[in-house]
Image (cartoon, coloured by chain):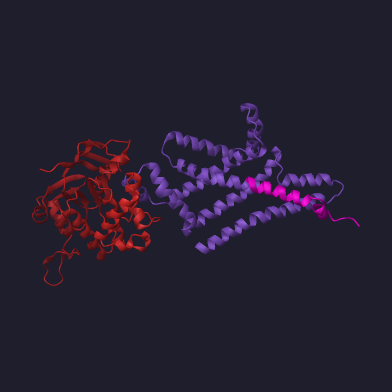
Amino acid sequence: MADTILRVNGIHKSFDGTGVLRGVSLEIREGEVVVIVGPSGCGKSTLLRCINGLETIDKGEIYLRDEKISGRTKDLHLVRQKIGMVFQSYDLFPHMKVMDNLLLGPTKALGKQKQEMEREALSMLERVGLKEKAHVFPRTLSGGQKQRVALVRAMLMHPEILLLDEITAALDPEMVSEVLNVVIDLARGGMTMAIVTHEMRFAEAVADRVLFLEEGVVLEEGTPEKFFHAPTTERARRFLQSFTYASKRDKAEVQPKNNLED
Amino acid sequence: MQDLGISILFKGINFQRLMGGLWVTLRLALITIGLSCLFGLLFGVLMLSKKRVAKVFCRVWLEIVRFMPQLVLLYLVYFGFARLFGWDLDGETSAVMVFTFWGTAEMGDLIRGALTSIPLHQTESAAALGLKKGQVYLYVLIPQTLRRYVLIPQTLRRLLPQAINLSTRIIKTTALVKMINVTEVLKVGQQIIGQFYRQPDAAFWVYFVIFLLYFLVCWPFSLLAKQLEKRWA
């Protein structure tokens, strides 16, 4: 069995007295893709933010491999170097060209050679179909292109695990699949990931395991086949129902068409 | 025929002396503005620190600047420090110290405003890359702040006039240094008036010319501000 990369142990987090995470545990093994779904405000994003220390947890522990990374105040940047994260909003640095965005982490945080990294960055850009955009400013890119660059930027740090926080939520629908296909490509390459998303078909396609979170508690955990087709809790059933529409013609319920190509 | 008072300015090397004085004024102001920008940048970053020590430090600095007349600070440094620490500071150095102390606080406040206007997720995504706090500022936040000064219209509209306004205030305030024996343009003017004490309208003409000189120096700054606003608005 593959090594455990991330172990989240009964973590609690509250904002202004409201419990957002109430005893969440989670284990992710090397090469595994865990998708976290749940209604808005269930604590999905907070969970990811706690993992790389953007939020401090109130109770519980988080381990990266065997190293305890929760409760640290010193050298948090060393932990974050091993945890890649891509956010919902386009967080490329607007004053830097794409290539400089990509090289900032590896050269300044990891102290790697610029030339060597440039080669790697170019080949990664090529892999996501953006090689010709290496020397433009982010403002000239579409939302989907920006998110692909953001994925490359995170990957160039060679993280142990990649956290994706609703990375297509701010995109126009026609750009969703170009980003998610990159994620699926990374998953096939064996990247360990924790993904928060509202794209259910994508979730089903990419996940090894699905976590259903509601009101800060893991209500259900299982394979995508089981979760999407035979959820055990009423809450999960209702949640999945909310992604379906009634048809005008035959009154049967239909799945909404998603842009995902494969 | 009685000479017009203004003619005394063109007697001997009086005009050159006045220009020399103006240069002292400008040099003082430019050094002060330059240092204020530099330290103001650091001060602005420090003002955002969550550390208690830093907060108290900035607070005390700002309060001193707010409540102390510049002249008192000038005397304190020029006369006081010489006695207390045995420093032999000349007037110009004292003036640069005092005015920079003031300019740093004001510029720092402007920079702080610009820094806080950069969206939080910029800081977060830089931190998520594993950069140290200082690196986040150095590579991500400060460059964006500086660009905001020049490139982004809305922030520029607010910031640049303020920064230029501060610069003209610094130029004007340098007149105080004549009180600590720096021979800047006002002091030179007074010396010239002293020389021509028999000429009753000398004072009017000399001060009028100095008024014009200050105007000529500060006016381009406000023109520049307007021009920049127009171009980037």
Q: Position of residue A147 (x, y in %)?
A: 29, 58
The part of the chain drawn in magenta is B1-28
User: Which is more toward the observer, B193 or B132?
Assistant: B132
Judge whether B12 appears above or below B50 on screen. Answer: below
Q: Is residue A178 visible?
A: yes
In the rendered image, residue B26 lying in the magenta stretch gets the answer yes
User: Which is more toward the observer, A257 or A94?
Assistant: A94
Q: Which chain is purple?
A: B
- Report which quarter residue B87 is drawn in: top right
In the rendered image, residue A185 lying in the magenta stretch gets the answer no
> In screen coordinates, is B190 left or right of A201?
right
In which quadrant of the rendered image does the N terminus of chain B lie?
A: bottom right
Judge whether A208 appears above or below B70 on screen. Answer: below
Residue at (68, 55) in percent of width and height: B215
Q: Position of residue A55 (x, y in %)?
A: 30, 42
Q: Position of residue B113 (x, y in %)?
A: 47, 48
Total numbered badges shown on the rendered structure: 0
Q: Which chain is red?
A: A
Judge whether A122 appears above or below A54 on screen. Answer: below
> In screen coordinates, is A174 left or right of B52?
left
Residue at (41, 51) in percent of width and height: B118
Q: Position of residue B33 (x, y in %)?
A: 58, 47
